[in-house]
Image (cartoon, helix red, strand yellow):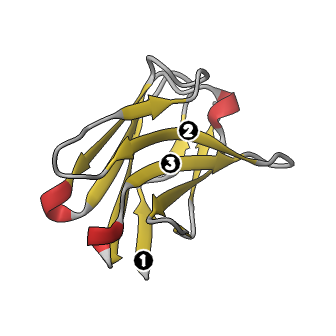
Amino acid sequence: QVQLVESGGGLVQPGGSLRLSCAASGRIFRIGVMGWYRQAPGKGRELVATISFGANTNLANYADSVKGRFTISRENDKNMVYLQMNSLKPEDTAVYYCNAFTGISYWGKGTLVTVSS
């Protein structure tokens, strides 16, 4: 079992920035990849970014819609993953979910990001 807790969501104006955090606990040693997904109102859940969680790799992958604006990072010693979001747009409004993959996907409860003036 892996437990994930997200934090850092909120209301931000277009063009602003937010940093999301995800704290992982439980069977951390089994995690191969961690990532962020989002679900906007009335839409399905979509990939935002993923990062490998092993000791010797640091491969990141981004959705085209966030490339150049969002950065995913990790602190393995703290079992944390972050999503730095810059130049936010109204279309980034969504509930953002942290995901950990061990062969099984684990999800946090999500944190709401609202981009609005």
CB contact under 8 Å: marks 3 and 1: no
Residue at the spot 26% in from the left edge and 70% down from the top edge: 29
Q: Amino acid at mark 1?
A: Gln
Report the residue at 24% width, 63% height from top. Answer: 79
* Residue count near mark 1 (Cα–Cα under 10 Å), binned few <14, some 14–19, many ≥20: some
Amino acid under disc 2: Val
Is residue 40 shown above or below 67?
below
Distance Cα–Cα, label 2 vs label 1: 20 Å
Q: Which residue is mark 3?
A: 36
Where is residue 38 drawn, in percent x and y? 63, 47
Q: Position of residue 58 (x, y in %)?
A: 26, 38
Query: Pointer 1: what residue?
Result: 3
Give the quarter of the image for residue 14. Answer: top right
Q: Earlier in the sequence, mark 3 or mark 1?
A: 1
Query: In 3D space, how far apart are the residues under numbered discs 2 and 3 (Cα atoms)?
Result: 5 Å
Marks 2 and 1 close (CB-CB < 8 Å) = no
**Element on which disc 2 rests:** strand
Of residue 50 and residue 85, the one placed in the foreground of this image is: 50
The C terminus sits in image quarter: top right
Sequence-wise, the earlier of marks 2 and 1 is: 1
Q: Which residue is mark 2?
A: 48
Decide: is 30 above or below 93.
below
Element type at marker 3?
Answer: strand
Question: Which amino acid is tagged 3?
Answer: Trp
